[in-house]
Image: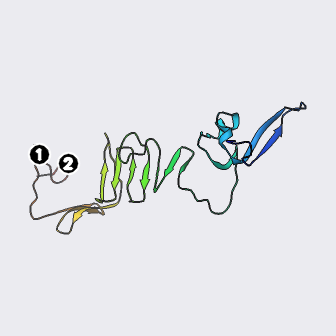
Amino acid sequence: PTLAQTPYIDLFERTGSDIYDAKMKLRLGDLSGLHGTRLGNEVAIDRESGFGLASENVYLSGLIKANSGSIGGIIMEDNKLFTGTGTHGNDNTGFFIDSASNFSLGNRFVWDGENKTLSVTGSAVTFETPKFFFGESGNSISGSNGNILISGSSVQIQTPKFYLGESTNYI
C-alpha cells in the first residue's frame, strides 16, 4: 500500500505447516503495494493501479462497467476495442472497432464508418455468394441464379482475349 494506514484486505492460502507457508490469493483495496509481487505480476498490476480487486480468478454476475482495461489481450479504451497498438486500418493492429463504426482486421479488411467505404486486400480475395450487386441503379454489375448483368450507359471491355459463349461454341 501507498501508506501504512491505507485500507486493504488480503486473503492467503496455506501452502505448508510453517507460519510463513502461505500464498497471497486476493487483495481488495489499495493495489499499489502489489506491483512487482508474485500476485501483482500474475494479474499485471502497474504502479498506478489505485483501488480495486486483484485475484487469480474472479467470478462476477450482473453489470460490469469500465472505461479502460484489457481482457485476454483485447484492449479497451474510451469508445474503442483493439489488439496491438490501436491504429485503425494498420497492420500493427490485428483487430479494431470503435464507436464511430470503424472496423478493421489489420490493413487487409478495413471499414471506414465515416466515408462508408470497405477495403479488402490480399493476394487472394474470395467472395462466395449465390447473389451479388455492385454499384447503383443504372450503373451496376449483379448476378444471381447463374446469370450476370452488366448495366450502364457505356460498357467497355478491354482485353486481348474475350470469349462469349460455351468453350466449344463462342464468339
Residue 20 image point, x, y percent? 85, 32
Instruction: Give residue 159's mark.
Output: 1
**133 to the left or right of 26:** left
Residue drawn at x 34%, y 54% is: 111
- Using the image, determine if residue 34 lies above or below residue 50: above
Residue drawn at x 84%, y 32% is: 21
Residue drawn at x 32%, y 46% is: 125
Q: Quadrant of residue 56?
A: top right
- The residue to which callout 2 is attached is 167
Is label 2 in a helix, a strand or a loop? loop
Residue 119 image point, x, y percent? 30, 50
Instruction: Give the CA distance from mark 2 to mark 1.
Output: 18 Å
| Circle 2: residue type | Ser
> Marks 1 and 2: in contact by CB < 8 Å?
no
Q: Residues within 10 Å of mark 1 (few under 14, many from 20)?
A: few
**133 to the left or right of 94:** left
Number of on-image labels: 2
